[in-house]
Amino acid sequence: MKNMKKVRVFSVANQKGGVGKTTTAVNLATALSALRKKVLLIDLDAQGNATVSLGVSRQGKTNNAYTVLTGQENIKNSMKETKIPYLYVLPSCKELLGLDIELAGVEKPQFFLKKALMAPELDFDYVFIDCPPAVGMLTINALTASDAVVVPIQCEYLALEGVADLIKTIERVKKNFNSNLDLHGILLTMFDGRSRLSYSVAEDVRRFFGEKVYKSFIPRNVRIPEAPSHGKPVLLYDYKCTGSQAYIRLAAEFLKREKELLKNG
């Protein structure tokens, strides 16, 4: 039997909306794919922004995140190729909106995604899960299935509000469902170099989280929000813009941190 490599699974999560969570999931996955890492992006947000940002339709009623989580389909048959080599997506759908209620009466509902990801034929280097901006059963499924969490924090007032609650949720999941879960890193997003507030928030976040904060940060850049309307990650929409270059630096730092974690066991 062929020995399958260990797939590293990451949730990109923040219960606060509008912090660059989906943008980070899409563009970090794209940057790693450009380095010939085979990546699967799972879109668990019913809005489907990650799916659309990769130029994939979310209209189908089958072969999507909902049918995988409910056991109707497997991931291999449901994931879609994107226009980006090495990058695949498991599309979102509007049916995810009611999944919390559907799973409420099911035994061990926290483990549905983890079970789906245990399929031996899933040959990926990395899996990223774009979580919804709420701590419901979808996010709990993502955290239970993950090795680590990437948390984007917007460089604005009250940036740390809600993150403390997310950290508590991560700790609860680690205690009850996934003892291996770790915080991979905190990512500062929407940094405005002209604003004292951005520097102040960055300082507060680094003081609070220390080495867990990535050295790379994502600046405010108009090309980043423009890109999804063209069905493209910003790396494909405008490779030379400051937003794209920031995600390239993040991918390099991400891989360096992964190498260090592997070295230290």
Image (spheres, grey):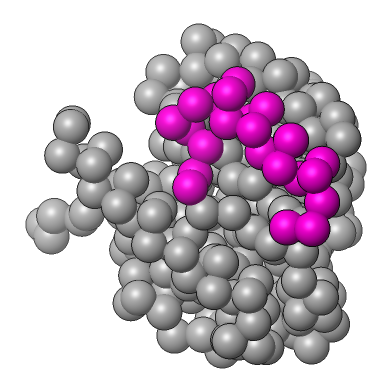
Q: Position of residue 239 (x, y in %)?
A: 58, 86
The answer to whether residue 41 shows anywhere in this view is yes
Q: Which quarter of the figure has residue 54?
A: bottom right
Which image quadrant is residue 231 in? bottom right
Give left or right: position of 236 versus 132.
left
Does residue 204 sit above or below 145 in this rendering?
Answer: above
Q: Quadrant of the C terminus?
A: top left
Query: Which is more toward the observer, 265 or 186?
Result: 186
Q: Left or right: 260 with respect to 114?
A: left
Does 122 appear above or below 99?
Answer: below
What is the x, y in percent for residue 107? 64, 21
Question: Quick one: quadrant of the N terminus?
Answer: bottom left
> Looking at the picture, does residue 52 appear above or below residue 2?
below
**Left or right placement of residue 217 versus residue 85 in this view:** right
Q: Would residue 79 be visible to someone looking at this image?
A: no
Q: Residue 171 location in percent, x, y?
A: 56, 15
- Of residues 121 and 23, the one nearer the viewer is 23
State the count of labels: 0
Image spot of residue 173 (x, y percent)? 57, 19
Q: Residue at x 24, y 48 (%)?
A: 259
Q: Foreground residue, 189 or 233?
A: 189
- In the image, residue 68 lies in the stretch drawn in magenta: no
Determine which quarter of the picture holds residue 222.
Answer: bottom right
Residue at figure coordinates x 52%, y 37% from the top left: 213
Instruction: Name which residue lies at 20% across and 55% down.
Output: 4
User: Which stretch appears magenta?
Assistant: 193-215
